[in-house]
Image (cartoon, rainbow, N blue to C red):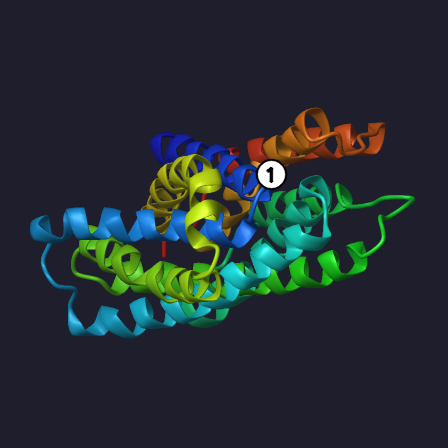
Amino acid sequence: MDAFVFSLVLTAAVLHAGWNALVKSAGDHWVRLALTNFLGTGFGLAALPFVPVPNAEAWPFILGSVAVHQAYFIFVCMQYRYGDLSHVYPISRGVAPLMVAFGAYVFAGETLLPQGIAAVAVICAAILSLTFSTSWKPGEGKGVFFALCTGVTIALYSVIDGLGGRTADNIASYITYLFMIDGLPFGLVVLYLRRNSFLPVLKANWKTGLISGLMSYPAYGLVIWAMTLSPMTYVSALRETSVILAVLIGTRLMGEPFGMRRLVAAMLVVMGVVALQTSKAPVF
């Protein structure tokens, strides 16, 4: 993977962990995520005059990604309702890369070299090991269930957008129209559901929602662009190193439990990232 692309995906990972921590922190998860999504729509509208309309072949991918993202947004809110950031976030992010690898192989014909396969496996195993706990809080079983559902949707939209970005004649156009549409359905539904209390909830959450949006959509835009240049599996695995920061935020700032097992797992993630970067990705 090109060093510049590598650094941008790592940047996206940091931003992703940051906006998830903001959504998880005290407040209304649904309203915060709705505000995040409305800002994404704003990004799309602002860029609209500067990009062409996507080609016809790209539209099924755009609409498919929008549909999957609506389920993703719901599962994200539900996993944070029942689980700790440092518990459910690694599950949802950890199960995705292997599913992306399978989808990329089936739909894009991507194959990985042995070192790349080993690196992805190490990253996934280390990320998932961060979820191990000797004592779960009441209700965290539901959090795990919704985190697994989140992971499935992550894999789905990653493969869809990886293929869609490569199908698009203009990647900026694909990202712009995706962002413009993506945030509206979930945001409008939340606005309707919170219609009797939206203004006071908005007053209490608008700052975190705004910051979350400023972190979320540039991060995913970088990921879509990176998947047009590198194998989807590599980008997905590298992106999920965001769990390291999420675990640190959860344990150090939110008072969630932390142990030596999680520290060792974090070191294994770093080792996997190094192996991934030094492996030579096949041409696709």
List x then y, in percent, for residue 219.
39, 41
Instruction: Out of 202 and 20, give the one closest to the viewer.
Output: 202
Quarter of image, res 260: top right
- Amino acid carrying label 1: it is Ser
119 versus 34 height, above or below: above
Q: Which residue is mark 1?
A: 25
List x then y, in percent, for residue 206.
41, 40
Q: Is residue 143 left or right of residue 62?
A: right
Residue 252 seen in the current view: yes
| Count of labels in the image | 1
Quarter of image, res 122: top right
Kindly identify the residue that appears in the image at 67 percent across and 42 percent down. Answer: 85
Q: Secondary structure at mark 1?
A: loop
List x then y, in percent, for residue 208.
46, 36
| Residue found at the far top of this picture | 252
* Mark 1 nearby-residue class (10 Å; few <14, some 14–19, many ≥20): some
Kindly identify the residue that appears in the image at 70 percent across and 28 percent down. Answer: 267
Kindly identify the residue that appears in the image at 43 percent across and 46 percent down. Answer: 202
Instruction: Out of 154 and 42, give the one closest to the viewer.
Output: 42
260 versus 53 height, above or below: above
List x then y, in percent, for residue 52.
9, 58
| Residue found at the far right of this picture | 134
